[in-house]
Structures are given as structure tokens and as C-alpha cells.
């Protein structure tokens, strides 16, 4: 089954250390959530795994299915089955959503094994229906003029079409109204299977009302300081983060 293993990861931006020795392991079949206050390094973690050049990995190991992630080119990471949704998906002109999805699916396949147009359209229709997306959406240019909610929904459509082994979803819930939130959760729940592992990074607990994570991790000051089950997210929602700071003697 898929495996992403992060050991003692340290990441700096402009010589300032942001991730300070982070450990996390995600396997197929598992949904993990990282929660934490703003500015604690959650997005930095996601950007570093993605290979963003501004984020310097200074120590630690990350393996994806046993292979050194940082030895892989960024497009190889995607090809190997790692999916990273960005907090602010970029606009890409001149390529439609459907074109993009089809080439992303085919990029993960061997030559001669490309998805047929018929099968692609069938899958796309099915998944867009589940995500309550308008069909016209497939033919719009990627992210151009999409509302915040449409971009998020579209990211989940990409996730469902590409079927990665491990996905890291950074603030997939930010700016969503309750209906869009439920749709996003429905898509992620639909993906649950032993060949798929997911890390949901969020500032808020509310998405976790609709997706029950197997494990919840609290990130503070560049480290995971506490891990637990879904009840941990509920306690954070009710009580905030101060009790953890007190428990661990963290000052800010
Ligand atoms: P979170 O996602 O938990 O809110 P971030 O990872 O976005 O936190 O930010 C962690 C810290 O790193 C913050 O102090 C932030 O200002 C800094 N940081 C993040 N990205 C950059 C960047 N591209 N350039 C400079 N500083 C950054
Ligand atoms: Mg932030
Ligand atoms: Mg963030």
C-alpha cells in the first residue's frame, strides 16, 4: 500500500527555520488531518514536499513508497502518485479543465496505456455529477475566473480523476460555504480506499465534521506536538489551542 514517510524534516525560508524536525507517516487507507494556528508552518510543509524552490530542506528524510522524495523531480512526484493541492491554485490560460485533467491522467500512465476519450468523458461526467458541478465547467479554461469555491471543488474533481496514491490538501476548506464544504467532503470520502492515503491540512475543525480522520495532528512552531483521534479535533474546536500550549509548556 502507498506510504509517505517524513522523518525529522527541517525546512528554512530565507535562512529562517520554519519546519523544525517534523515526523509523520501516512499509509494507504488512512486520512490524517494536521491542524494548527496560523503561521505555524502548515503550508510550508506542503510547499516543501511539492519542491517549491524557495523552501530549503536542511535536514531529514522523506520517502514516498520507499523512494527519496527529494531525489525526484517535481513532475516525477506527481507521476509516482503524489497529489498536492495548493492553497491558491493558479490560473492557467488556454487550457480547458478537461484537457488538463486528461493530460494529468495520461502523464501517470505508460505510453500506449492512455485513457480513451470515451472512458475519460464517462468518468468525468460521473464525478462532476457527484460533486454537483455544472457540465460546462469541463470546458472552461483552467481556474480562469473560477470563484474560490469553484477552484476548491475543481481540485477535488482533479483528485478524483487523477486517483493519486497520496494526496496533501492544504486548506481545501478555506472560504467554502457549508454546501460546498459538504460536497468537498463527499468527494474525499468517496476516495477512501486502501490504495489511497490523504493528509488534510486545515486551520478549522469544521471540515472534519464531514470527514472522520483516522488521525489528527496538532502542529505548532514547526513541529507536530500532539497526535490523537477525531476527538482531538473536537476538543480544539471547543477549547482552542491554549490548553496544548499549557500542557506542553509552549510560549509564543
Ligand atoms: P501556516 O500555513 O501554518 O499558516 P505558513 O507555512 O504559511 O504557516 O507560514 C509559516 C511561516 O513561514 C510564517 O512565519 C510565514 O510568514 C513564513 N513564510 C511562509 N512562506 C513564506 C515565503 N514564501 N516567504 C517568506 N516567509 C514565508
Ligand atoms: Mg497561513
Ligand atoms: Mg497555510
Image: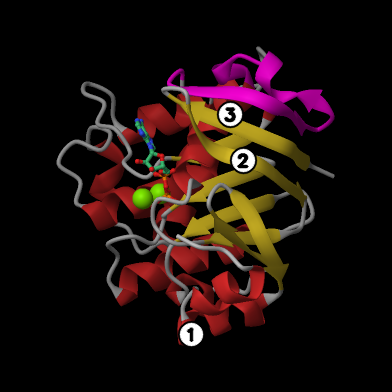
133 is higher (above) or lower (below) than 243? above
Magenta residues, start to end: 53-76
In three-dimensional space, the C-alpha distance between marks 1 and 2, rounded to whole angstroms, equals 25 Å
Q: Callout 3: 10 Å neighbours few (<14), some, many (20+)? A: some
Magenta span contains residue 61: yes
The residue sitting at 69% across, 26% down in the picture is 59
The residue sitting at 46% across, 78% down in the picture is 240
Tell me which label, 1 or 2, sits earlier in the chain. Answer: 2
The residue sitting at 47% across, 51% down in the picture is 40
How far across and down, in percent of the image, does residue 116 sit?
A: 55, 28
Q: Is mark 2 on a helix, strand or loop?
A: strand
Tell me which label, 1 or 3, sits earlier in the chain. Answer: 3
Task: Residue under label 3, please give it.
Answer: 115
In three-dimensional space, the C-alpha distance between marks 1 and 3, rounded to whole angstroms, equals 48 Å
Looking at the image, the residue that sits furthest to the left is 145
Q: In this rendering, which labeled residue sits more in front, label 1 or label 2? A: 2
Q: What element carries label 1?
A: helix
Magenta span contains residue 11: no
Q: Is residue 116 visible?
A: no
Is mark 1 in CB contact (under 8 Å) with mark 2? no
Q: Which mark is residue 239?
A: 1
Task: Residue under label 2, please give it.
Answer: 20
How far across and down, in percent of the image, does residue 183 sit?
A: 41, 68
168 is higher (above) or lower (below) than 36? above
Amino acid at each position: 500500500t502507498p506510504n509517505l514517510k517524513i522523518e525529522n524534516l527541517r525546512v528554512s525560508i530565507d535562512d529562517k527555520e520554519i519546519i523544525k524536525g517534523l515526523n509523520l507517516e501516512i499509509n494507504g487507507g488512512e486520512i490524517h488531518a494536521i491542524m494548527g494556528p496560523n503561521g505555524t508552518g502548515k503550508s510550508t510543509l506542503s510547499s516543501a514536499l511539492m519542491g517549491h524552490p524557495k523552501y530549503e530542506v536542511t535536514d531529514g528524510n522523506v520517502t514516498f513508497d520507499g523512494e527519496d522524495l527529494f531525489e525526484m523531480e517535481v513532475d516525477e512526484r506527481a507521476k509516482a502518485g503524489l497529489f498536492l493541492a495548493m492553497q491558491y491554485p493558479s490560473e492557467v490560460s488556454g487550457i480547458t479543465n478537461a484537457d488538463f485533467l486528461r493530460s494529468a491522467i495520461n502523464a501517470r500512465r505508460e505510453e500506449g496505456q492512455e485513457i480513451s476519450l470515451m472512458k475519460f468523458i464517462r468518468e468525468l461526467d460521473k464525478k462532476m455529477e457527484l460533486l454537483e458541478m455544472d457540465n460546462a465547467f469541463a470546458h472552461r479554461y483552467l481556474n480562469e475566473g473560477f470563484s474560490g469555491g469553484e477552484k476548491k471543488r475543481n481540485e477535488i474533481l482533479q483528485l478524483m480523476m487523477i486517483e493519486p496514491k497520496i494526496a496533501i490538501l492544504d486548506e481545501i476548506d478555506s472560504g467554502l460555504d457549508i454546501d460546498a464544504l459538504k460536497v468537498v467532503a463527499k468527494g474525499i470520502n468517496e476516495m477512501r480506499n486502501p490504495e489511497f492515503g490523504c493528509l488534510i491540512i486545515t486551520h478549522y475543525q469544521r471540515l472534519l465534521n464531514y470527514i472522520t480522520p483516522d488521525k489528527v495532528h496538532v502542529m505548532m512552531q514547526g513541529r507536530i506536538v500532539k497526535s490523537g483521534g477525531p476527538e482531538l479535533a473536537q476538543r480544539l474546536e471547543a477549547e482552542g489551542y491554549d490548553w496544548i500550549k499549557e500542557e506542553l509548556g509552549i510560549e509564543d
